[in-house]
Image: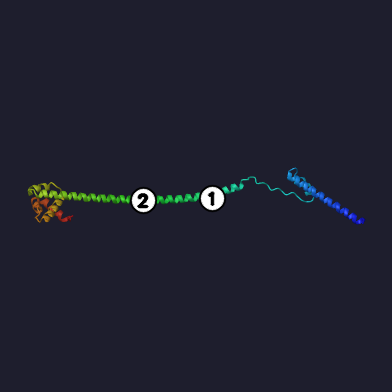
Amino acid sequence: MAYYGGIGAVARVFILFLLVIVLVLGGLIWFDYLGIIDVKETLSPVFEAVGLHKRTPVKAIDDPLLLERVRIKKKEEALIITAEKLDKRAEDLKKREDELSQKMEKVAEEEKAIAEKEKSFNERVKAFENRRVNLVQNSKYLVGMPPEKAVAILLKMDDQDIIDTFRITEEEAAKAGETSLVAYWLSLMPPERAAELERKMARMPKS
């Protein structure tokens, strides 16, 4: 009986010892929670004695905005790339605009040249028509004059004007079914001048 009683007393002491340890640990944890003591710092010698080292605290990030800065930097790089693409596209568009402007200028110059040629042609046609009208009128005046007076007026004109007047006179006589006075006018002119006019009239085609 004395042996079993001794075993029971040892067990109770051990249980009481564990209970004390639990209460101490619980108290330490509670005080640590309340901020009264720092359990890790207080028990650090005990941890080191039993071979448990304190965990090295994680070094806080020096710049709390580092991730945000990295994100912003990536956005900036993306914006730079986009800006370069836009600049390249703008450069291409400018080049195309310059080429188009050059083509438009060339077309405008060609249109201007065509317009000037057309204007010049119209002016020549108008001048020719006006000259013809004047030649017809002069021919009528000369036909209505005495031949000697008409020849005197013709001799004061240059050869080309005389030839044009002769041809108009022949055309108007043919239209009216009459005999042209050109041959008679030539007969009244000095032989040398008449021969020169006949030679030129034979060489120059009728317009």
Q: Name the residue under label 1.
A: 78
Q: Nearer the viewer, residue 206 or 60?
A: 60
140 sits left or right of 22 in the view: left
Q: Tell me where residue 88 appears, x and y as whole percent.
A: 47, 51
Q: Quadrant of the C terminus?
A: bottom left
Q: Residue lying farthest front?
A: 1
- Counting residues from the start of the chain, the first of labels 1 and 2 encountered is 1
In the picture provided, is 100 more to the left or to the right than 195?
A: right
Q: How far apart are marks 1 and 2 (CA)?
A: 38 Å
User: Element under label 1?
Assistant: helix
Residue 17 screen position, x and y as percent: 83, 50
Label 2: which secondary element: helix
Which amino acid lies under the numbered mark 1 shown in the image of this protein?
A: Ala
Residue pictured at 41% horizontal, 50% vertical? 97
The number of callouts visible is 2
Q: Which residue is drawn at 53% across and 50% down?
A: 78
Q: Which amino acid does label 2 sit on?
A: Met
Identity of the residue furthest to the top in this view: 36
Quadrant the N terminus occupies: bottom right
Q: Name the residue under label 2.
A: 104
> Mark on residue 199?
none
Q: Residue furthest right?
A: 2
Viewer-proximal residue among 132 and 58: 58
Q: Is residue 38 above or below residue 173?
A: above
Near mark 1 (Cα within 10 A), the count class, few <14, some 14-19 or many ≥20, is few
Q: Looking at the rendering, which quadrant does residue 4 occupy?
A: bottom right
Q: Is the C-beta separation of discs 1 and 2 under 8 Å?
A: no
| Left or right: 166 as drawn, with respect to 44 | left
Question: Which percent across, then down, holds residue 141?
Answer: 11, 48
Left or right: 111 as drawn, with respect to 73: left
10 Å crowding of disc 2: few (<14), some (14-19), many (20+): few
Residue at the location (59% across, 47% down)?
Answer: 68
